[in-house]
Amino acid sequence: MARKKPKGKSAAYMMFNVTYEDGSVTSNRRISNDLLDQSFGDSIQDLARTAIEDQDNEIAQRSGQRRAKITDIARA
């Protein structure tokens, strides 16, 4: 007798497209659902912006190049 396949878990992250002041766009930036917890009343956009800025700062420290400021964040 065949076993049932286990149901997949919901995605552990959300994807966002980010537009910067210099006109560059990054697509499908992953943000962990743990970082997008709305229990304190913050919007998902604000939480995603904070998480993406943290990612950009970490990348900038490693590469030595700063990113432009974020102008828009849209859910992918």
Image: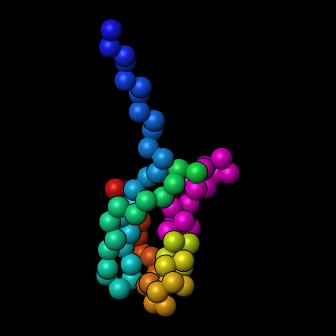
Judging depth in this view, the residue of 55 and 19 nearest the camera is 55
Tell me the residue at 58%/51% (across/down): 34
Characterize the magenta stretch by its predominant secondary structure: helix
* Picture quarter with the N terminus: top left
Judging depth in this view, the residue of 37 and 1 nearest the camera is 1
Q: Position of residue 75 (x, y in %)?
A: 38, 56
* Picture quarter with the C terminus: bottom left
Tell me the residue at 49%/91% (across/down): 64
Q: In this view, which residue lies farthest toward the bottom?
A: 64
Q: Quadrant of residue 11?
A: top left
Q: In this view, which residue lies farthest toward the top?
A: 1
Q: Is residue 53 visible?
A: no
Q: In this view, which residue lies farthest toward the front?
A: 1
Q: Is residue 22 visible?
A: yes
Q: Which residues are magenta?
A: 35-52
Q: Check the image and report above or below for 48 versus 13.
A: below
Tell me the residue at 35%/86% (across/down): 22
On whether residue 47 falls in the magenta region, the answer is: yes
Q: Position of residue 25 (x, y in %)?
A: 32, 74
Tell me the residue at 51%/61% (across/down): 48
Q: Check the image and report above or below for 42 versus 18.
A: above
